[in-house]
Structure formats: structure tokens, C-alpha cells
Amino acid sequence: MSLKIGIVGATGMVGAEFLDTLERRRFPVGELLVFSSGKTKKSVVFRGRRLDAPAVSIPALCSCDLVFFAGADEISKKLAPQLVQKGVWVIDDSSAFRLDSRVPLVIPEANAKALAREKRLIAGPNCTMTGLAVAAAALQKEGGIKEVRISSYQSVSGAGRDALAEFFGQAQDDACRLKFSASGRAPIFSEKPARFLPGKISGNVIPQVGIFDPAGNSSEEIKVAAELRKVLNAPFLRVSVTAVRVPVVRTHCLAAWIVFRRPFSVQKAARLLKKAPGIKFYKGPSYPTPLSCAGKYPVSVGRLRQGLGKSELCLWVVSDNLLKGAALNSVQIAEELLRRGWLKA
Ligand SMILES: NC(=O)c1ccc[n+]([C@@H]2O[C@H](COP(=O)([O-])OP(=O)(O)OC[C@H]3O[C@@H](n4cnc5c(N)ncnc54)[C@H](OP(=O)(O)O)[C@@H]3O)[C@@H](O)[C@H]2O)c1
């Protein structure tokens, strides 16, 4: 069986991971149509062949069996409903439909049951909460989760290609000044305005991801909480988030404190996390980092320990925002549709 697949935003960072993931996982792609903004002439390489990536064309997209969206919210909002009406399956990595009650928001390890044959528009989650949702779902069945507190350490690639290019430029400027002064004093770098993030990220840590609401919560913090509730099917879950951007290229990290409805031992949690699909569990003193997890498929969980009481666990979750946080998760959804026989050539 081979399918006609489309990728909107194929020339972006998530798009590049789609091409690699579809190829590596031998997804049955018969024909691939790739699209960009069309502002400049672009192409991509898939299975060793160069493919032109023109601006989106609705007739071409409507001829596909499945289209992955990795462009921007407005593009998904405009095009996805039209494709679904024509019977095309759509898996959208933008945030356009994630909180729409008619659209399943799916992380296969956590809530594949949310998929429905008649719901051809499926949303992929925010890259920040994906890893934690996989780990929390593995524990939720045993413990019933009451409350989650999260501090995130989010890489710059999560903010898109322009933000990452700006970070590279800042880091190169800083690199030549990385030396002790004659007196042995450590260099002091000054803050500078930036175009794509709230401030200079090289050598810095910025506790703002998105824009703030009147109560002082950032849009990212609000999204993470709402999406976690939706994926875990726990509408009353208490979630508190502080989202922070760090000068890391790819892979998001989260420190999380999970409070359960009953006592939950570290030993029992370790047993569940070890056997949970999609998780690489680090026991003892070892732990995952962005550098050890970048480009890898599993969600990595470490630093598991008891929290303030017997019902609270602390953990450290690391996952690649461009893979499990976007392209890989979407390809896994498509694989699930194939397994169920819903997606057919
Ligand atoms: N970065 C992440 O970690 C991450 C994680 C989860 C979800 N997402 C979501 O995935 C999407 C892509 O993110 P990204 O980081 O890959 O962004 P990116 O690197 O900036 O790439 C954006 C892509 O969208 C295309 N595009 C821009 N305007 C377009 C238009 N009007 N019509 C069609 N295509 C257009 C771009 O084409 P050109 O090359 O021609 O500019 C490019 O292929 C976003 O919705 C983002 O929220 C990102």
C-alpha cells in the first residue's frame, strides 16, 4: 500500500523532521507533495530525490490521502477544514485547533483512544507538554493525578527558524568575547533587543514564552496547562506552569512535580515508567539532557524522587521538540490510522 502524502511547511524545521521521520520509519509514501510559502524558490530532498516546494495549491492538497501541516496557525485555519471536507486526513502541528472540542488532540502513547474514524482533522500537541503528557499518562492509571507544577526549560528551535538563526548570530558575536580580562574578571555581556524573542537569548535565560495575560501568565503557560488537561482527559486538573526559554538549540526540558490522589512510591513509578511505551527511563544518578536527547525519538525521564509528601513525585522530562513535540508525534498518529485501517490508499 502506498499513499499520497502532502506536507505544508516542508521547508521549515518541523518540515525537515517530517521528511527524515517518514523516510526512517518507512512510512508507505507512494507520492509526496511538499509546499512552502512560495516567497522564494525552494526544494527539499526525500529518499535521495529533490522535490520542488512551491506555494500551497488547494487542488494538489485535495488529491492527497493525508496532509501534515507544519506551517503556521493561519495557514492551518484556512486550509485544513477545506481538505477535511474533501475526505483528506489532516494532522496539524500548529496550535490552530488544539483546544477545539471537536478536534482530537492526540499523543498516541497517552490518548490514542481520542482518535475517531469520522474526525479527519487531528491536532498534534504543544511541544512543551508532550513529553510530560507521555510520562504523566503512564502514571495516571495507577495514581489519579490531582495537581501538576511545571518549570520548563525550552530550546530556541521551539520558537521557529528565525529565532534560531538570531540565536546563532548572537552566539557567534559572543564567542569572540569569551575570554577573561587581563585582571581575570569574567566577561559581562549586556542585554540587547532581539527581533524574534523578548530579548537576547545567547548567554541568557528568559522567563517569557509568548505574551502575558492580565494575570501575568504567558500564552505558552496557558496552552501547556489547557492541553495537558485535554490530553489526560482531566478537565479539573490543577496545573501551574512557569515557561522559560534557555539558550539551547533543540530539545525541551521540564522539571515537574506531580501530586496524586493517593500515596505513590518512587519504586512503583519507576516500574511503570520503565515499561511505558515511548519512554526511556534513567534510574539512579544518571539523567537525560538536551545534548543526550536531541534527535532521539523517546521521551526521556530521570531524577525521579519523592516530593513533599507521599503523594507527590518529582521528575525531569526531556524530549526533542521537533520530533516527539511535532513531526514524530504526527507520523505516529498516521501510523495508528494505518493500523486501524482508517487511512487507506
Ligand atoms: N518548532 C517547534 O519546536 C514546533 C513544535 C511543535 C509545533 N510547531 C509548529 O509547527 C509549525 C512550523 O514550525 P517550524 O518551527 O518548523 O517553523 P519554521 O521553521 O519557521 O518553518 C515555517 C514553515 O512554514 C512555511 N510557511 C510560512 N508561511 C507560509 C504560508 N503563507 N503558506 C505556506 N507555508 C508557509 C515556511 O515556508 P518558507 O520556507 O517558504 O518560509 C516553512 O516551511 C508552526 O505552526 C509551529 O507552531 C513547531
Image (spheres, rainbow, N blue to C red):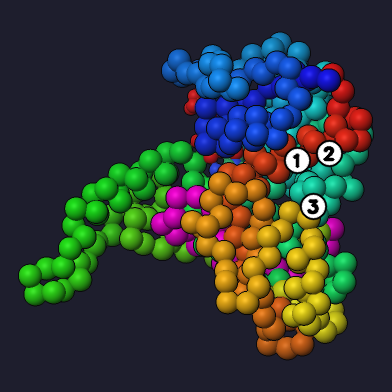
Outermost residue on the bottom side: it is 309
Secondary structure state at the residue bearing disc 2:
helix
Disc on res. 332: 1
From this viewpoint, is residue 148 visible? yes
Numbered label attached to residue 336: 2
Tell me where residue 2 sits by quadrant: top right
Answer with left or right where residue 30 lies relative to residue 166: right
In this picture, residue 242 sits left or right of residue 304? left
Q: Is residue 108 above or below residue 267?
A: above
Residue 234, position as x, y percentages in the image? 83, 62
Three-letter amino acid code of the residue under disc 1 = Gln
Q: Is residue 4 magenta?
A: no
Q: CA distance from mark 2 to mark 3?
A: 10 Å
Report x, y in % for residue 325.
Answer: 64, 48
Q: Quadrant of the C terminus?
A: top right
Quarter containing the N terminus: top right
Amino acid type at circle 2 is Glu
Judge left or right: residue 310 versus residue 317: right
Q: Residues within 10 Å of mark 1 (few under 14, many from 20)?
A: many
Asked if residue 234 lies in the magenta stretch, the reply is yes
Q: Residue at x 87, y 23 (%)?
A: 344
The amino acid on which the numbered mark 3 sits, given as a three-letter code, is: Glu
The answer to whether residue 211 is seen in the rendering is no
Boundaries of the magenta span: 233-256
Label 3 crowd bin: few (<14), some (14–19), many (20+), radius 10 Å? some
Residue lying at the far left of the rendered structure: 182
* Residue assigned mark 3: 109
